[in-house]
Image (tube, grey):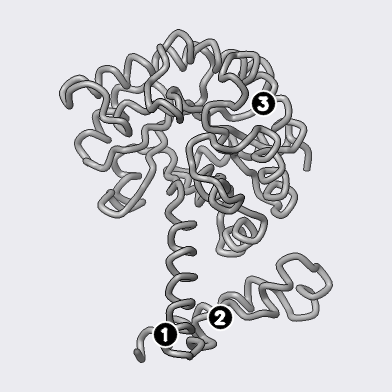
């Protein structure tokens, strides 16, 4: 499926309220998210960075992030929206243009572009970021542009000024061509509802422990729910737990707690997948076994 078709499909998915976008960091995690039933997938810059041995915060070169996103896009049949942090390069509109053109060629359906510097943790001026978003719009065609506003994430200003500053920035970014507004760092239901009422674009909230549930976010009017590095963190925690069990107890866990080798292998081999029946059926069987094990223990 070409970029134009994936972008159009991704736009249509925004009729779901909320559209849930679990975040992948490599081809295997993307395939598992697709297998779980995700209609579209986001990427997580933190997860990609950790996989490549770097800290989060635009520590990767543009080509390194693009290679990771390309593997994810190729691995799945659903639309992928790419976290490109601040756009890479020198952060200018020209740098954003270069990144977005490359993403379109890779088949990405959307992007997140943040209005802060990952290195300084300082917000860009709204006019500067609007120029970057306009460049993304011109280069991206029908790409769905999710403009990230980091006022709450970095606790900029006093608490009583943050809604107003976020709304002001959202209006500028909407005029520059953004399709959605992403406000990470907000978990308070009243604040979320106020943002949804005041922002004239679909609002994306990053869910995390302590945030309202997906259904509650939907009732508050949130259009998109993503989870950033949460699933990658869970995968790392599971790895740590299994490793500690092996090293400290000399045991290997229970088979029902693992994704079977056959299913994992079949994620990337159509012949193996067809030979074992549908992957969805096999994965559901694995999930049922895990649920029974959890109930017993």
Residue positioned 22% across, 21% down in the render: 157
Q: Residues within 10 Å of mark 1 (few under 14, many from 20)?
A: few
Quarter of the view holding residue 13: top right
Under tag 2, what secondary structure? helix
Q: From what the image shows, is residue 41 above or below residue 260?
A: above
Front label number (3 vs 2): 3
> Can you tell which mark lies on residue 286?
2
- Where residue 232 appears, x then y in whole percent? 49, 57
Q: Quadrant of residue 102?
A: top right
- In the image, residue 135 sits, relative to residue 224, either above or below, namely above
Q: From the viewer's perspective, tell me whether residue 108 is left or right of residue 241.
A: right
Q: Earlier in the sequence, mark 1 or mark 2?
A: 1
Instruction: Say which label, 3 or 1, has the lower sequence index.
Output: 3
Pick out the residue farthest to the front.
247
Q: Quadrant of the N terminus?
A: top right
List x then y, in percent, for residue 240.
45, 70
Left or right of 177: which side holds 217?
Answer: left
Who comes first in sequence, dot 3 or dot 2? 3
Under tag 1, what secondary structure?
helix
| Mark identifier at residue 100 | 3
Label 1 with label 2: CB-CB less than 8 Å = no
* Label pair 3/2, CB-CB below 8 angstroms: no
Question: Which residue corresponds to mark 1?
Answer: 248
Measuring from the top left, give residue 200's x and y in whole percent: 39, 21
Which quarter of the image is occupied by the C terminus? bottom left
Alpha carbons under labels 1 and 2: distance apart: 27 Å
In the image, farthest residue toward the top: 127
């Amino acid at each position: 499926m070409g970029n134009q078709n994936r972008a159009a499909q991704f736009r249509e998915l925004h009729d779901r309220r909320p559209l849930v976008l679990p975040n992948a960091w490599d081809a295997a995690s993307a395939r598992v998210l697709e297998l779980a039933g995700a209609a579209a997938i986001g990427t997580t810059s933190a997860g990609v960075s950790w996989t490549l041995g770097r800290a989060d915060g635009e520590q990767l070169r543009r080509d390194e992030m693009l290679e990771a996103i390309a593997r994810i896009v190729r691995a799945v049949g659903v639309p992928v929206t790419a976290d490109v942090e601040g756009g890479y390069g020198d952060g200018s509109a020209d740098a954003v243009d270069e990144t977005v053109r490359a993403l379109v060629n890779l088949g990405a359906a959307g992007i997140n572009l943040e209005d802060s510097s990952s290195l300084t943790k300082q917000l860009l001026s709204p006019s500067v970021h609007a120029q970057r978003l306009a460049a993304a719009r011109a280069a991206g065609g029908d790409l769905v542009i999710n403009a990230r506003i980091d006022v709450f994430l970095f606790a900029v200003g006093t608490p009583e000024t943050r809604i107003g500053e976020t709304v002001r920035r959202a209006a500028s970014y909407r005029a520059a061509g953004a399709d959605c507004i992403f406000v990470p760092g907000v978990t308070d239901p009243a604040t979320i509802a106020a943002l949804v009422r005041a922002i004239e674009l679909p609002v994306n909230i990053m869910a995390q422990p302590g945030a309202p549930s997906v259904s509650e976010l939907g009732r508050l009017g949130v259009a998109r729910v993503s989870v950033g590095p949460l699933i990658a963190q869970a995968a790392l925690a599971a790895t740590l737990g299994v490793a500690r069990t092996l090293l400290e107890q000399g045991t290997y866990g229970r088979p029902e707690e693992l994704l079977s080798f056959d299913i994992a292998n079949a994620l990337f081999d159509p012949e193996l997948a067809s030979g074992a029946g549908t992957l969805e059926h096999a994965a559901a069987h694995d999930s049922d076994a895990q649920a029974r094990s959890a109930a017993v223990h």
